[in-house]
Image (cartoon, rainbow, N blue to C red):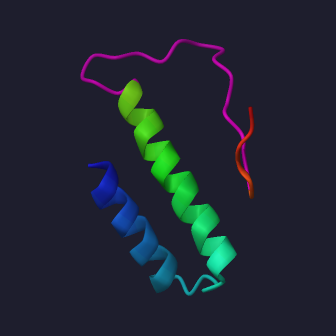
């Protein structure tokens, strides 16, 4: 599901006319790749996200540690 969502996300960026700048596109694709994999770690049926978990932050350089 993650790969398909990523492809749809990229197509949506194209449809929306977002910049074709290589660095921008690379950052957006890297974020979406990370985000879909992250969600799959805690999204099985019946799973629950614990309250007050820290919100990951993403920059042009990638995930902040």
Left or right: 42 as drawn, with respect to 52: left
Viewer-closest of 63 and 10: 63
Tell me residue 48's x, y (percent).
41, 16
9 lies above or below 32: below
Q: Residue at x 57, y 53 (%)?
A: 31
Viewer-closest of 21 and 43: 21
Left or right: 53 as drawn, with respect to 37: right
Kindly report the secondary structure that dominates the magenta region of the rendered protein.
loop
22 lies above or below 33: below
Left or right: 62 as drawn, with respect to 9: right
Q: Which quarter of the picture shows residue 27?
A: bottom right
Tell me residue 23's x, y (percent).
68, 74
Q: Residue at x 67, y 73 (%)?
A: 24
Q: Which residues are magenta?
A: 42-59
Tell me residue 43's x, y (percent).
35, 27
Q: Residue at x 39, y 27 (%)?
A: 41
27 lies above or below 20: above
Q: Residue at x 48, y 18 (%)?
A: 49
Q: Which quarter of the picture shows residue 5?
A: bottom left
| Count of numbered badges drawn on the protein | 0
* Magenta region includes residue 7: no
6 lies above or below 57: below
Left or right: 60 as drawn, with respect to 49: right
Quadrant of the image containing the C terminus: top right
């Amino acid at each position: 599901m993650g790969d398909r969502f990523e492809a749809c996300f990229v197509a949506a960026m194209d449809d929306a006319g977002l910049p074709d700048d290589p660095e921008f596109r690379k950052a957006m694709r890297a974020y979406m790749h990370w985000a879909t994999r992250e969600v799959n770690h805690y999204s099985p049926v019946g799973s629950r996200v614990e309250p007050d978990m820290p919100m990951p932050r993403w920059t042009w350089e990638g995930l902040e540690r």
